[in-house]
Amino acid sequence: MTSKFLPVFAKNALVEAHQILPSVLNGVATHADILKMCRSFRRRGICEVLLHGTPERLHHFLAMSGHAYLYSLSQGNEETLLTSRAPPLLDALACGDQDTARAIALHNSKPLDPRREYEEDFLFMQCLVGMVTSSPVGDEERAPRARPVVLARQPQDARSEVVESLHYRNAEQFNTALTQLLDEEHARWLRLQEKGRGLEEDAATEMHVCVEGLALLRLAEQRGLHVLTEYLAVPSLVRVKVPNLPGPEAWKDPARW
């Protein structure tokens, strides 16, 4: 167990989601409220897999996060939407819900807001959105293509290497870059803990199961890349494919959580 308080964090996650739910269903929730509820679903799913070793429950809650977020977008709740800040898109990708991921991505195409988001974060998510919304690639289209302008604008770091490797379908580059990305993320969590700046709930959950990493692995597998069996914070246990995800209305009914 990552923390003796993990059962408490799991319970609190559902309590928080339950408190926000009425405002979402009544159409008065803010975009921040929606993201908070989706984070609660994500945290609960991570708690379940850490406590009980049940990846099905992780994917169940990730799917509900994606569905709830898409519902909010479909209701016109986009006033503060930022392309770089759409974790539920990664949730949908991570659990294998491609239809929901694509629908979210189609909404997630606003221009850069330099006052509220970093350009490198925007470019990273913009690249992923393009991959999610593009049509399935046939064999005749698998030849290397010209480097997209959006890639050329990105600073060279682990994230840009991941995106480039996905674009060119370079498995070796992808595995190296994703390993580096996950190592850097783990180091970031350790620094936050050392400085006393990280929330214990986050350190006990997202430090040990990286949903972003899982989402990137799903994209790699879709593009035919040979990936490693184990990665830091993305163990093989959480990468199982769950055939029966909850329906798009399940998140609305706490009895189905």
Image (cartoon, rainbow, N blue to C red):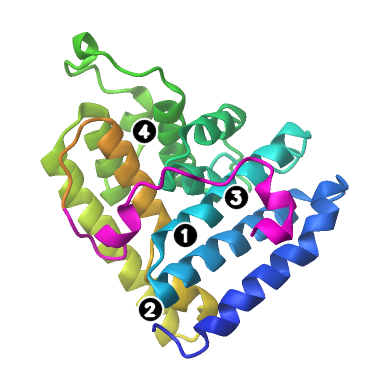
Q: Amino acid at mark 1?
A: Leu
Q: Residues within 10 Å of mark 3 (few under 14, many from 20)?
A: many
Closer to the camera: disc 3 or disc 4? 3
Give the magenta range.
229-257
**Residue 49 shows in the view:** yes
Q: Amino acid at mark 2?
A: Arg
Please report the residue visible at 42 percent of the width from the left and 43 percent of the height from the top.
243
Q: CA distance from mark 1 to mark 4?
A: 35 Å
As drawn, 8 above or below 213: below
Q: Amino acid at mark 4?
A: Arg
> Disc 3 marks which residue?
64
Q: Residues within 10 Å of mark 2 (few under 14, many from 20)?
A: few
Q: Is residue 152 left or right of residue 70?
A: left
The numbered mark, 1 or 4, whose residue comes first in the sequence reads 1
> Disc 2 marks which residue?
191
Q: CA distance from mark 3 to mark 4?
A: 34 Å
> Disc 1 marks which residue?
58
